[in-house]
Image: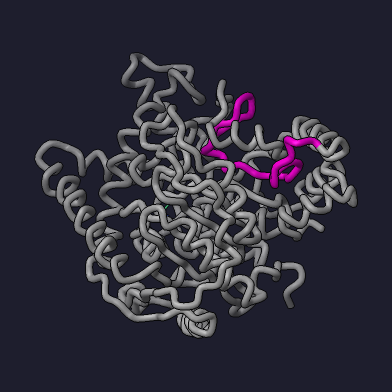
Amino acid sequence: MNFITAKDLSTKFSKKEVSSYDVTKKIFERISESKLNTYITTCKDLALEVAKEADKKFEENSSDITPLTGVPIMIKDNISTKDIETTAASKILKGYIPPFDATVVKQLNDAGAVILGKGNMDEFAMGSSNETSAYGPVLNPWDTNKVPGGSSGGAASAVAAGECFIALGSDTGGSIRQPASLCGVVGMKPTYGLVSRYGLIAFGSSLDQIGPITRSVEDCSNVLNIIAKQDSLDATSVNSPYEDFTEDIYKEIKGIKLGVPKEYITENIDSSVKANFIQSLEILSDLGANIEEISLPLTEYALAVYYIIAPSEASANLSRFDGIKYGLGVKKAKNSSEYMREVRGSGFGDEVKRRILIGTYALSSGYYDAYYKKAQQVRTLIIKEFNDAFKNFDALVTPTSPILAFDLESKNNNPLSMYMNDICTIPANIAGLPAISIPSGISKKLPIGLQFIGPQFGDKKILQIASNFERATDWHKLNPFNYD
Ligand code: GLN
């Protein structure tokens, strides 16, 4: 029961086979017994109340029922929830209770979803292993000696481990897709602007995007139907060109053109990931896709561009955490600058400090042109390179992560090796493109993911391709407890 899709759960609600109240209660039992550390905060009383309301709607066959009514959902802890502590997994925000809901939270509440609590994550979404959280690491349910990926590690681990049916994550350079890949679930970063960022604690504002982590492509499409709406509170949000993201998922993909950018298959790719990728291409080709290798030579600069732009934006965004308006404060300080130094020095973790230092340096006078401006220029070229590729291809297909889930603490002292995890996911953020990761296999009892990248607003197309692949395979039906 805990491992069925949200769609199947909703069908059971309609047939009155189970109630949202009972399912929600069971999930909380599971969470309280879990060692995975997926949640930073839970809100059981509120969730059970909402679940009861959902059950009433099903009893009355209300016209308000949506595919998410009564469905237990986790929200990553960098997404603001009114009256529920929101820390972005940082000590500096401990005790911060937002007085408002993020737009996506409001949309989920209006849809009748049951919010269980807040997902553990890397501090301020900076990381690829969930180990920078001030609230302890999250474990991978497939092997608890391994990381779940990050930064939405709590979200992916919880969906995989039956500790929620759906989670909302955020993706600045891969933080939805990489953990989804490492935990064997579906994760999508929509086109930049499609989902409101209002209430998302900003990391790199020109890269950040909220998106779903689910157990099926259809569930992912149903979440987008609810959250992909223009929002006057986010100036970068746009009107969705689509009414219904599920519309094409059952249409076949015969004749579709898929490009395989050869630069994504680097020397450092794990041999099992590579073998799996080749098998996945065969499946796509059997489904009728025309697959061709292409070259995107600027890919090699994407990581460098990201590690200038993301920290630069982060250094500006995180300047608001001064211990005055939110969260942590310190008792003794001689003057305001000492106060802020104390608060920021003790409130931020090492990775966050590293990003603030890099970003401040890149933006400082004398270096701005050499780093930030140059990175923005290369970003424009990367966008153009993608646009040119999409003149000939409907979508691109790549591995999501070059490696399988790795051992806890194995990369903590090597930031560069940690940053290399995102080599296949970062380019889509640089160019604002939609990208989805879906389960494509298992090696050494660990999941592998496959990524589809679409042109801007090609969200429906990549959902269609991903859904066809999903139906042709059984990988998404496996979970850490039924796989041997
Ligand atoms: N792992 C990348 C980083 O550390 C991406 C994080 C994200 O997408 N939020 O910045």
x, y percent for residue 476:
65, 68
Q: Which residues are magenta?
A: 62-86
Residue 270 showing in the rendered view:
no
In the picture as drawn, the residue positioned furthest to the left comes out as: 366
Q: Residue at x 79, y 48 (%)?
A: 27
Q: Residue at x 72, y 51 (%)?
A: 163
Colouring used for the render: one colour
x, y percent for residue 201:
46, 35
In the rendered view, would you say 47 is above or below 454? above
In the picture as drawn, the residue positioned furthest to the top comes out as: 335
**Residue 283 among magenta residues:** no
x, y percent for residue 445:
64, 76
Is 208 placed left or right of 215 in the picture?
A: left
Q: Nearer the viewer, residue 4 or 354?
A: 4
x, y percent for residue 99:
56, 21
Residue 197 showing in the rendered view:
yes
Tag count in the figure?
0
Is 106 placed left or right of 327 in the picture?
A: right
**Residue 64 among magenta residues:** yes
Q: Nearer the viewer, residue 332 or 9?
A: 9
Of helix, strand and loop, which mostly describes the magenta segment? loop
Q: Residue at x 59, y 79 (%)?
A: 443
In the rendered view, would you say 77 is above or below 407? above
Is 268 placed left or right of 242 in the picture?
A: left
In the picture as drawn, the residue positioned furthest to the right comes out as: 17
Q: Which quarter of the rendered picture does the N terminus lie within?
A: bottom right
In the rendered view, would you say 481 is above or below 226? below
Q: Which quarter of the rendered picture does the C terminus lie within?
A: bottom right
Q: Residue at x 36, y 59 (%)?
A: 455
